[in-house]
Image: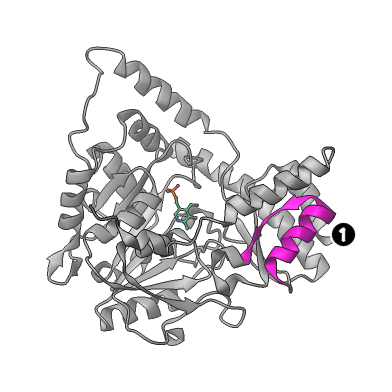
Amino acid sequence: MKLNKNFDNLKQSYLFVEIAKRVESYKAANPGADVIRLGIGDVTRPLTPTVIDALHKASAEMGTPEGFRGYSPDSAGYTWLREAIASCYEQSGVNVTPDEVQVNDGAKSDLGNFFDVLGSVNVLVPDPVYPAYVDTNIIFGNAISYVSGNEENGFLPMPSDISGTRPDVIYICSPNNPTGAVYDKTRLTEWVNYALDNDALILFDAAYAEFIAEPSLPKSIFEIDGARKCAVEFGTLSKMAGFTGTRCGWTVIPDELEYDGAKLGKMWYRRQSVKFNGVPYIIQRAAEAVMSAQGLREARELIGYYRENAKTITSALDRAGIKYTGGANSPYVWLKCGRPSWDYFDYLLTEKNIVGTPGAGFGSGGEGWFRVTAFGTHENTVKAAERIVS
Ligand code: PLP
């Protein structure tokens, strides 16, 4: 019997474990401390009324002989949900057909599993970035190279920043976790052109797309000419509608997208039908409710709540003259701490009773920077923002 030895190359999942350890030991020593957590990127607001109604209704249906559903007829999702998702794209001026949408249990699964259809590839990952991209490629034994996001390029690495191996696969996350930086159309067009010229595939992670407030910024890579020939997009309701624990997302693979001579949409559909039996009916009904006119209004209110928190944080940083990226079109504020990020973590925890995330946890390019999230309550965010700059 042989194990997948690539697992030996994974670093211990050290970041959030270490954060929890330090917070617990501080709280044990200071039981009265009012510690505010703006560290983990999870949402805090409840599901909205339209979603709850849909969940109740679908649950009740499942308890009747007529309404009961077993296996979903299609691992890619019920047609009505794929149509609803496609129509949301259409509302923002992007043509995506329901057949190009494949529903899943959240973006993380497909972002990682997609390598089942790709074989051994060279991947290009921005640094700093969402750590799952790196770990999934370590498990697959892929060659990983990095492109640096830094203060000079506004944490928006460009093709001209690539050094070394030509990548087969390029991850782009915009708005970015952890930096909150967002590509504009010109910069994203450069990446699309680079991918087309180099036969590379872009995996575009749009997990935070709905946080974009500035209308000129692209929410989808398919707003860029040529992207349908070189990109796959991953969407999710996790942050947009509070589905982190409810679980529903989707992957868009344009019909004409070919890679190494094969239609990727068809391959991914085949892969999913072998290894995935679809998202629960009840959850798909909840997702459909998010996409309704009222559901979208409520989701926008939810996002507005977090956006106000981001504004609270960035206004305080502006007053204190602390540099940052993000906040305006993203739930993350990425501030320059000007010292090793774990030292800043300890300082904020012990002196200000605030928990954030050290930038070094997102790659070596994150050193000297620190992530604060807008996912807390208004009350805690106001307190935390004042404490950070006091
Ligand atoms: N992509 C990014 C950049 C994220 O930050 C996250 C979650 O934090 C995900 C994907 C995963 O999202 P989901 O909950 O849909 O799996």
* Magenta portion: prevailing SS class: helix
Horizontal side of 305 relative to 26 (left or right) equals left
Asked if 260 appears above or below 18 in the picture, the reply is below
Neighbour tally class for label 1: few under 14, some 14-19, many 20 plus, Cα within 10 Å: few
Asked if 137 appears above or below 368 in the picture, the reply is above
Image location of residue 224, percent across then percent down: 35, 70
Element under disc 1:
loop
Task: Answer whether residue 43 is magenta in the image.
Answer: no
Magenta residues (range): 340-359
Q: On the rendered image, what quadrant is the C terminus found in?
A: bottom right
Q: Which residue is mark 1?
A: 390
Quadrant of the rendered image containing residue 2: bottom left
Image location of residue 206, percent across then percent down: 43, 58
Asked if 244 appears above or below 320 in the picture, the reply is above
186 and 278: which is toward the camera? 278
113 and 219: which is toward the camera? 113
Image location of residue 52, percent across then percent down: 47, 27
Horizontal side of 209 relative to 322 (left or right) equals left
Furthest-right residue in this view: 390
Which residue sits at x=57%, y=42%?
302
Horizontal side of 169 relative to 160 (left or right) equals left
Horizontal side of 327 relative to 312 (left or right) equals left
49 and 340: which is toward the camera? 340
